[in-house]
Image (cartoon, coloured by chain):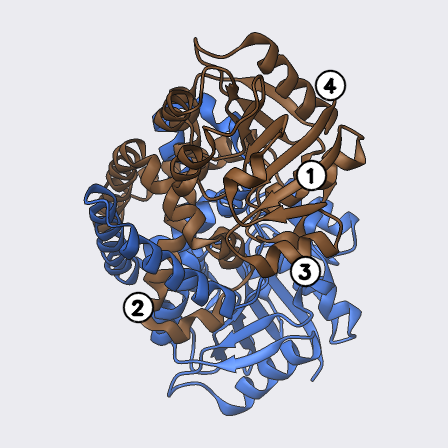
Chain colours: A blue, B brown
Amino acid sequence: MYFHKVTILGVGLIGASLALALKKYGLCNTIIGYGRTQGNLIRAQEKTIIDSFELDPAKACDDSDLIVFATPVGIFIDIAKQISHVLKRNAIVTDVGSVKGNLVREMEGLLSPQVFFVGGHPIAGSARSGIDTASAQIFTKAQCIITPTQNTDRKALETISAMWRTLGCLITLIEPEEHDRIYAAVSHLPHLLAYEIVNTVADINSLYLTFSGQGFKDTTRIASSHPELWRDICMHNRDNLLAYIEIYKKNLDRVSRYLRTDDAESLNRDFQRARTLRESIGQD
Amino acid sequence: MYFHKVTILGVGLIGASLALALKKYGLCNTIIGYGRTQGNLIRAQEKTIIDSFELDPAKACDDSDLIVFATPVGIFIDIAKQISHVLKRNAIVTDVGSVKGNLVREMEGLLSPQVFFVGGHPIAGSARSGIDTASAQIFTKAQCIITPTQNTDRKALETISAMWRTLGCLITLIEPEEHDRIYAAVSHLPHLLAYEIVNTVADINSLYLTFSGQGFKDTTRIASSHPELWRDICMHNRDNLLAYIEIYKKNLDRVSRYLRTDDAESLNRDFQRARTLRESIGQD
């Protein structure tokens, strides 16, 4: 596959890294960036991550063969509405968002039947954000989830899969709603819980934070993640998250009961279960 | 300071590392290990971490100048009862346990007035345990909390502080009860929460664990920690933990409300608060 013109909507960590990787592997000719912060786009151009930029998303997508949504997911729909009328016939539209489900269904509905939408989610994020951390390497051996629906064009699906595979990703195809159930559990819930661990310690006594060791730093590393990005993800995946928070609270209640009733044996079994599961995904 | 004979009660990660460090810095002549698993003691002796070992704690402490409790905290009292009658006059007894509070008071009461007890807690643990991870280096630039009480002998306090300082630690003196409030917040609560994140994902669907990325691995790394060790710590610090779990659940309830009521602005402010606090302790 080869794209003459690519538009990256949102030139942050993932958008900029994708731009770098597309160039590195010779998959495109020109890359146009769109974003809300002109200073960031100017810097991205200076660093030759993008070739040029536009502050109007419709202008940025003019004549593009591949359009990639890489903004926070909360503004996908708004941008889709602004660009749908200008998209080139047979253009492929994809995204790198952490939520799929309804969002993929809505994007499909908004975009003209003359273009092809394929949802994607490379698992290559980081607590650090922005173009300074961007690198073509972040996709090497990363998982990339592609979320086809019954409406997805098979050829466009193959093109997007081949693109990520060329960039080094391991592709898995998953239905959008199942994607959201999975990532609510292994990503969105842990982010929310990590933010609240930090807030809880500050509620207790913010001076205590100065005593934090490596364990606390590991456990709360993702609380450095971009708040707006994660607010959008959590809001879009709220039903799964709300259900999972209740399951989590039930676990906390059970452990509290063990503590209150001095049930050391049950507490040990509970921790042992978690340890065995955690070790099953590797020690790193 | 120089110790002719040192007894390490519990030759795990911290006990073995302390033995290695005491020898590296030339602070002692002989080190006797005590533990419940003969195989581990034999290996520790083969690796010259300890010079010899005993399976009876009283025998292990015979004629020692320095006795270090490095077992899980749950068996401190039992061992203290077994050794108190054999301790040499003016011997110093210390520990490396993660809980202090009542435990320090009880240890003081159990040990004869002819020996000196000084509570200590080097912040040098890891999700990995056992002698294979042991190293004299783990104390370099580590914080070490010393918890004197009104009963603590000033000279013994100075000796123990000087020992940890020689090994590379940064010393802070804190009252035992305040130590437990601090470490319940920045260490014991995060461990308990990390164990329950893993259990919650398994409750949802244990197959989902295979989709975990770096964020999940960081957040749950300490769920690989030794269950018995953390069961004992949590049980001994239960009052603080139970109170903090309730504060945490209140934070989860507030965030759930933001999700249910579509209050994106409040959710953003909540995450932003956590991010600012998390970044204040460094990005690593």
User: What x and y, as percent, mark residue B19?
Assistant: 69, 39
Q: Which mark is residue B204?
A: 2
Q: Secondary structure at mark 2?
A: helix
Q: Is residue A61 above or below residue A200?
A: below
Q: Is residue A193 visible?
A: no
Looking at the image, is mark 3 or mark 2 nearer the viewer?
A: 2
Q: Secondary structure at mark 4?
A: loop
Q: Quadrant of the N terminus of chain B?
A: top right
Q: CA distance from mark 3 to mark 4?
A: 56 Å
Mark sitting earlier along the chain (1/2): 1
Q: Are marks 1 and 2 on the same chain?
A: yes
Q: CA distance from mark 4 to mark 1?
A: 15 Å
Q: CA distance from mark 1 to mark 3?
A: 54 Å
Looking at the image, is mark 3 or mark 4 nearer the viewer?
A: 4
Q: Is residue B241 above or below residue A172?
A: above
Question: Which amino acid, mark 3?
Answer: Ser
Q: Which residue is mark 1?
A: B31
The answer to the question of whether label 1 and label 3 lie on touching residues, with beta carbons closer than 8 A, is no
Q: CA distance from mark 1 to mark 2?
A: 49 Å
